[in-house]
Amino acid sequence: MVPRVLIASAEVPGGGEALRLIRRGDEFSIMLGSNELMNSRLSGSEAALANLACEAIEDRASPHVLIGGLGMGFTLRAALAVLEKDATVSVAELVPAVVDWARGPLAHIHGDSLADPRVQIAIADVGDLIRAGRASYDAILLDVDNGPDGLSRAQNDSLYDVAGLSAARASLRPGGVLAIWSSASDRAFTQRLRRLGFAVEETAVRARRQWRGAPCHLAGNRAAAMTGALSLRASRRVRA
C-alpha cells in the first residue's frame, strides 16, 4: 500500500483545524480534518464551475472574474483557457500557504497559471472583496466550501446568508453570474437566491470527468437528475 505523506500544514485564519497537504504516490490532496477538500485526480467539477460561469459572459468585452479560493488551481486554469486576453481574473485566497504550495510542491499542477498576465492574486477573504466592489465583476466563482455552509471556517457562512448574497448581487455588473460549488443541492439556499432576485440554474457534473459541456439538460430552473453525479455546481445568474 502506498503510504500517505504529510507535505505541509497551514492554519486557516479564523478556523479551527489546520489545512494539510498530503501526497500519496503521485496524487495530492488538501485535507481539513478528516474532510478531503480537493484531490489532484478530481478536477472535472472545478473546471465545470469555470466553464458554466465564463460561458454566460463570453460575449462581454474585458470581463472581470473573481474566484474565491485558489486550491489546486483547477477553476483558475479552466477560466483562463476560455477567457480572452482582455479578461482580468482576480483570485482571493485566504491562506497564504496555499499560494506557496501552488508555487512549490503543486507547481506541476498549476502550470504557468499564476504567471498569466490576466491573473491577480490577493491574500484576502473573498467576502471582503465582494463587499468592497460595486458593479465590479462580470462573474464571481466561489469554491471555498463544500456548499452554502462554512466548512473550512464558520465565518464563511456570511457568504451565503441574505447579507452576503445581497453584497454579491451588488458587486456584479448587470446580467453577471454568481457560480457556487456545492457537493449537494440545497433547496433552502436556492429559494434564498431567488428571493434576492437571482435566476437560478443547477448543473450536476462528475468530479472525475474532464469538462466537455453540460452533462445534463436544464428545463427552466429545474435541473434534470444525473445518475452517478459526484458533485454539483450551481450557476447563479443575475437577471439583467
Image (spheres, rainbow, N blue to C red):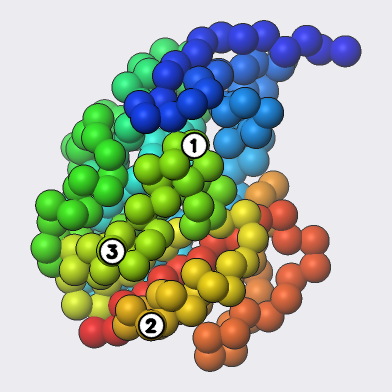
- Amino acid type at circle 3 is Ala
Identify residue for label 1.
Answer: 152
Residue at the location (25% across, 78% down)? 175
Marks 1/3: CA–CA distance:
20 Å
Q: Secondary structure at mark 2?
A: helix
Identify residue for label 2.
Answer: 195
Marks 1/2: CA–CA distance:
27 Å
Which class describes the residues within 10 Å of circle 2: few (<14), some (14-19), or many (20+)? few
Residue at the location (20% across, 47% down)? 129
Q: Is residue 73 visible?
A: no
- Amino acid type at circle 1 is Ser
The image shows a total of numbered marks equal to 3
Q: Secondary structure at mark 1?
A: loop
User: Quadrant location of residue 139?
Assistant: bottom left
- Amino acid type at circle 2 is Arg
Which class describes the residues within 10 Å of circle 3: few (<14), some (14-19), or many (20+)? few
Residue 134, given in percent of the width and then of the height, sits at 11, 63
Q: In the rendered view, does 31 fall on the left or right side of 179?
A: right
Residue at the location (23% across, 63% down)? 167
Front-lying residue, 133 or 80: 133
Residue 224 sits above or below residue 177 on the image: below
Residue 60, given in percent of the width and then of the height, sits at 21, 70
